[in-house]
Amino acid sequence: MAYSDKVIDHYTNPRNVGTLDKSQNSVGTGLVGAPECGDVMRLQIQVDSNNVITDAKFKTFGCGSAIASSSLATEWLKGKSIDDAMKIDNMDIVEELALPPVKIHCSVLAEDAIKAAINDYRVKNGLEAFEVAKSHH
Amino acid sequence: MNLPIYLDNNATTPMDPRVLEAMLPYFNAKFGNAASRNHAFGWAAEEGVDYAREQVAQLIGANEKEIIFTSGATESDNLAIKGVFEMYKDKGNHIITCVTEHKAVLDACKHVEKLGGSVTYLPVKSDGLIDLTELEAAVTEKTILIAIMYGNNEIGVIQPVKEISAIAHKHGALFMTDATQAVGKIPVDVNADGIDLMAFSGHKMYGPKGVGALYVRRKNPRVKVTAQIDGGGHERGMRSGTLNVPGIVGLGKAAELCRLEMNEEAIRLSALRDKLQASLTVLEESYVNGNVEHRLPHVANISFKYVEGEGLMMAMKDLAVSSGSACTSASLEPSYVLKSLGLSDDLAHSSIRYGLGRFTTEEEVDYAIEQTKKAVNHLRDLSPLWEMFKEGIDLDTVEWAEH
């Protein structure tokens, strides 16, 4: 199976690899997946007082498509409001990276990681967690 | 040095140019049907086949009449297991095999179960070897066949075939072995090892694809299998079908080259393999899978914890290796062989198999070492699991959101 150029680009030069200080209230952390399944994504966002994501970082254990999906997610998140970030759909990632059907679960995981990070941020700041639809699982 | 580097010789080997040369005349000048008994074209083809049969027999210490040519090891495994079951079903219906066998053996056994057979799938110890006491305890009065592979394709461990065949014969059962990875790599002698049936293939020993053989013992005891392909009664009635003359000639030449060169080759390859393994296990949290003492000379299967195998292979784009990672298959299940060693799923996902071969050079191995180290370190920098491990977090205590 050949990888798309965009997957290879994100895989070779992953954007926004790193760690934010999860003890800060302005940071939301999403950790999704499981080692047994071969994919674990950790996605973090830094949110300012206007509910805008000013920074995003990731680390991923997984195949090239999983790494590329999370790298792309961090790129898309930066500068977005929380509300807009909630609208990122896994199929947008599939389309952008031209993921084959067998790799769609990587994009699902990235969407889950975004929502988990946002909800972590919200709960930390005394807000109610958004309900996350699990229809694509 | 040409890139990419081929280190997947357990999947298939490149053909030796000397094998190709031996085959070429049988594609044109000597195109005859080996079964044509009445003209020179048939005789020329038959002569090529007869000579190849001798070359193959010699490699494994057999008589040439005991070699049945097939399309490859999968067909040979099927013929041996289904053929023995059909032939000996009045004597018993029980077969013993083990969980790390190739799918060709496991699936043939499953087929036999549907026909009323009973199959015991022995587990393996954490080093990949079967427990001989467990094997003997599994034998019943109905046991007609013990089918245990010689060398494993994923981890390279060599089963104690002599001891296994002794147990089989003590209880009046036949011993069959899938020796696809072993024949041509290490000395295999059907008499010294007590083998009654043995499957092997051309393309794993520098010969062509699409040709293999089944060794079927003719004396002490005389073994028979029921044909699975009916037709013109070729190969002593056990495998009908016009003989693949060029393929068979290639298999014969490949067998001869292995017989003459494998001892030196094994010494050279095991030294290179040991160098690769020693250099890579210097990396933190890397583990060799399977028994390292009883192992084929050219194989090393190593897990690099906290990195995922497919991601790793992508980072080593100039190396052709393989992984037990789930992501390489559609099933999303990691290697059943590694799991049967008791390896946790995450270690199975993190494994890379290096299979060296006749044309592997030391320069290539050195390059593979550098590429692997670089890739493992790169991916660990990206791995949240590695970061957690470094922070002293016990990953087994984390509640993972399984998807």
Image (tube, coloured by chain):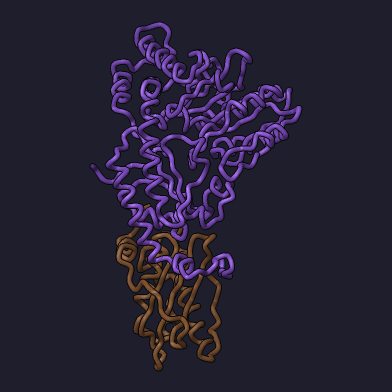
Chain colours: A brown, B purple
Name the residue at 61% across, 21% down: B225
Where, by quadrant of the figure, is residue A56 drawn?
A: bottom left
Residue A52 position in % (x across, y down)? 38, 88
What residue appears at the point 50 percent right and 73 percent down from the top-left corner? A31
> Can the viewer see residue B48?
yes
Q: State whether residue B345 is above or below residue B226.
A: below
Residue B240 can be seen in this image: no
Please state which of residues B403 and B298 is positioned toward the viewer in this rendering.
Answer: B298
Query: Residue lying furthest bottom in this view?
Result: A49
Instruction: Return the residue found at the far top.
Output: B38
Task: Out of B279 and B210, give the one closest to the viewer.
Answer: B279
Quarter occupied by the N terminus of chain B: top left
Residue under the image location 52 percent in, 69 percent down: B393
Horizontal side of residue A137 vs B300, given as left or right: right
Relative to residue B349, is residue B190 depicted above or below? above
Figure quadrant of the C terminus of chain B: bottom right
Position of B252 with respect to B126 (left or right) is left
Above or below residue A74? Residue B111 is above
Residue A37 at x, y = what percent?
A: 53, 60
